[in-house]
Image: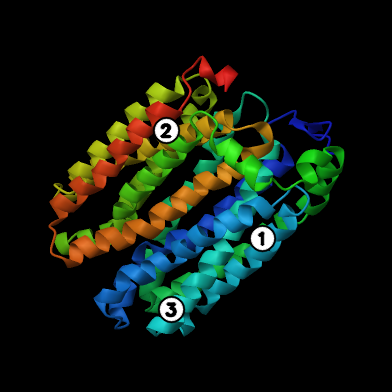
Amino acid sequence: MSQETDGGQTPRTLWSYGFIVINLAALFAFSNIAVFYSFAPYLQRIGIPPAWHGLLLSLEPMAAFALRPVVSPLLTLRNAAGVLLVSMAASGLALALYPLALTVPAIAVLRLFHGAAFVTLVSAATAILVHFVPQGRSAQAFGVFTVMTQLPFALMPLLVERIIPATGNAAHAYALVAPAMLPAMLLAWPLLRTTRSMAAACPHQGRKRPSASEIAANLRRPGVAALLAANLLVFLGTTSVYFFMKERFLGLGLDEIGLFFSVVTGATISVRLAGAPFFDRLDKRRAACAFLLLLAASLALLGRAASLPAHLVLAACYGLAQGVALPLLSSAMFLRSASEFRGLSSNLMLFMMDAGFFLGPLLWAGLLAGGMPWGALYACAALPVVAACAAAWAGAPGRRGDAQA
């Protein structure tokens, strides 16, 4: 039995070894995704026709979208650590293969393989994470976890922008990230024993896989479906920034795309680190909606900005907004779900993220290819986030609901 848990069920402290390692695993996992902010210009450079760009961008999240509902119900406390280690190795291998994939079919296969490895990694990490969250600390725990998922988006663009001139090729920069999986695997190895001990002390949560009827019953719980819809809509809108802002900068003659993403992520991380201890005290419904509206406004105004200072101010507002809204949505889902389905529900939130990352590039690339101007594109991108606000209002508990959800 882990000394950091009570009977294998309730963690005594948030900062257990397991919680720290899972967050480090998320840091390394998202590092191998954060490098792909430059993927569309890279495809253009190696001669891939623009008509293929949206599909090739979407294939990695499409694989995640398709596989997460299959993978998530199969993960238990007993098997998730082993799955985590295997998927880490597969993610590193995928990154190393990008310099060899130079045709549409080769890139398509690699993107699907990479997506499968990544979704399995994050699903396994999330399935373990929920067992290391103490009662009453869900918003703080998910705030820390989302900091780890966002930190690479501040660091990797700056790093890659400096590696590309030395390597002459973005794919070689992707491959250089692959070795980062090795320390992550070494740190995660002890979780094999820890999670098996926890599973033995809590057999119901450690071994049982939910039935289809149980999953359906959890989805019918108040607020669950609305929160899933909110997460989908947020990521549908925000993929317009992640995948296409570099192209927007190039069109404006601006060179500091790495700085833009660093400001976004710096604001996100700062507010989560400073605010995480207070997130659990907030009225999640009101706070999530307020910051989703700020996120929508930031998106709409990004389409009108023309100078670097204007973009950086909006980047700070955008990062601040998502820095508060997203962990509050995750915490709300944690509270709304039955305790035995919290790992599954958290993975379903990630499934909605996958859906947004799959559908978003197809939608926004199609609109750009059809001649839509940038101002109109980002105004359209703000609309799903406004809709997410309505869904969050319907699904998130208020301050009183925290104790009752």
| Earlier-in-chain disc, 3 versus 2 | 3
Three-letter residue code for mark 3 = Ile
Three-letter residue code for mark 1 = Pro
Give above or below for 242 relative to 203: below
State the image coordinates of residue 213 (x, y, percent, origin top left).
64, 43
Within 10 Å of disc 1 (Cα), the crowding (few <14, some 14-19, many 20+) is: few
Q: Which residue does the numbered mark 3 point to in the structure image? A: 107
Q: Residue at x 40, y 39 (%)?
A: 230
Q: Label 3's element?
A: helix
Q: Residue at x 63, y 63 (%)?
A: 88
Nearest-to-viewer mark from 2 and 1? 2
State the image coordinates of residue 308 (x, y, percent, origin top left).
20, 50
Res. 343 visible in picture: no
The quarter of the rendered structure image containing the C terminus is top right
Marks 2 and 1 in Cβ contact (< 8 Å): no
Locate residue 388 relative to residue 69 in the image: left or right: left
Give above or below for 173 relative to 364: below
Within 10 Å of disc 3 (Cα), the crowding (few <14, some 14-19, many 20+) is: many
Mark drawn on residue 106: none
Give above or below for 365 relative to 329: below
Q: Residue at x 62, y 23 (%)?
A: 136
| Earlier-in-chain disc, 1 versus 3 | 3
Locate residue 234 relative to residue 111 in the image: left or right: left
The quarter of the rendered structure image containing the N terminus is top right
**Label 2 to label 1, Cα distance in Å?**
30 Å
Mark drawn on residue 324: 2
State the image coordinates of residue 296 (x, y, percent, origin top left).
27, 38
**Label 1 to label 3, Cα distance in Å?**
27 Å
Marks 3 and 2 in Cβ contact (< 8 Å): no
Q: Label 1's element?
A: helix
